[in-house]
Amino acid sequence: MKFFVDTADTDAIAELNDLGMVDGVTTNPSLILKAGRDILEVTKEICEMVAGPVSAEVVATEADAMIAEGRKLARIAPNIAVKVPLTWDGLKACKTLTDEGSMVNVTLCFSANQALLAAKAGATFISPFIGRLDDINLDGMELIADIRTIYDNYDFQTEILAASIRSPNHVLDAARIGADVATVPPGVLKKLADHPLTEKGLETFLSDWAKTGQKIL
Ligand code: E4P
């Protein structure tokens, strides 16, 4: 499973990138607001740090304007994935931009039929939002499983990018189902390493080691 980091915070990306955990980055207008940076400037900086796909989202709602914004974003760097919403205009923009050779991430996916349309429009990535479905008492993980089944049935090459991940269990369940990518907020990604038995075991080893009086270096 590839890990994308779901943030426009360059310090957080750099820290995880140094650990070799970053296969790509996703941003959206809310994350750009949170970062308080200019979209073109911060996206360029992220693209220079990370070798994998960096999603940058259009904000137009009509296809021609989305395509124009997408072309501008795609010029930032070769590893840009233009993010478009799952509307008919977004799907039209997806088809045009992928035909031109850009990577496209179709976002705000909340149903398997929407994911089917995105694959048919040639999307590089489909972003089903797990957490936001769970928030309204639906089952985000069931959506990931349905999309996996449908894409495998027809050998669609669109990658399933599990998004709106809120917990380590979301990552685990998406990995079990076979999502190709999880885009994870930095705080959740860091939690993946936590286990109380690891902490407890390390504490015991260190205290026993101190009693040996030895040193390795
Ligand atoms: C990723 O591409 C999405 O923009 C992001 O995962 C949304 O997450 P949220 O529902 O926590 O805002």
Image (cartoon, grey):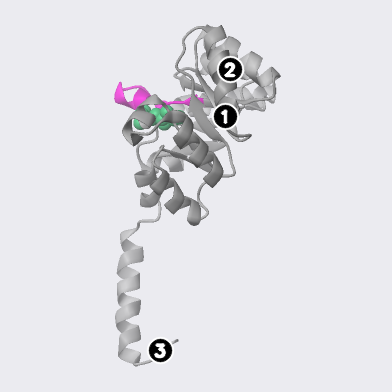
Quarter of the image that includes the N terminus: top right
- Three-letter amino acid code of the residue under disc 2: Ala
Picture coordinates of residue 96 (x, y %)?
A: 65, 14
Discs 1/3, front: 1
Picture coordinates of residue 124 (x, y %)?
A: 62, 27
Q: Quadrant of ligand 1?
A: top left
Mark toward the start of the polypeptide (3 vs 2):
2
Residue at the spot of label 3: 215
| Label 2: element kind | helix
Residue at the spot of label 2: 118
Q: Which mark is residue 24?
A: none
Q: Which mark is residue 81?
A: 1
Q: Which residues are magenta?
A: 127-140
Q: Ligand 1 near label 3 (Cβ, under 8 Å)?
A: no
Discs 1/2, front: 1
Marker count (numbered): 3
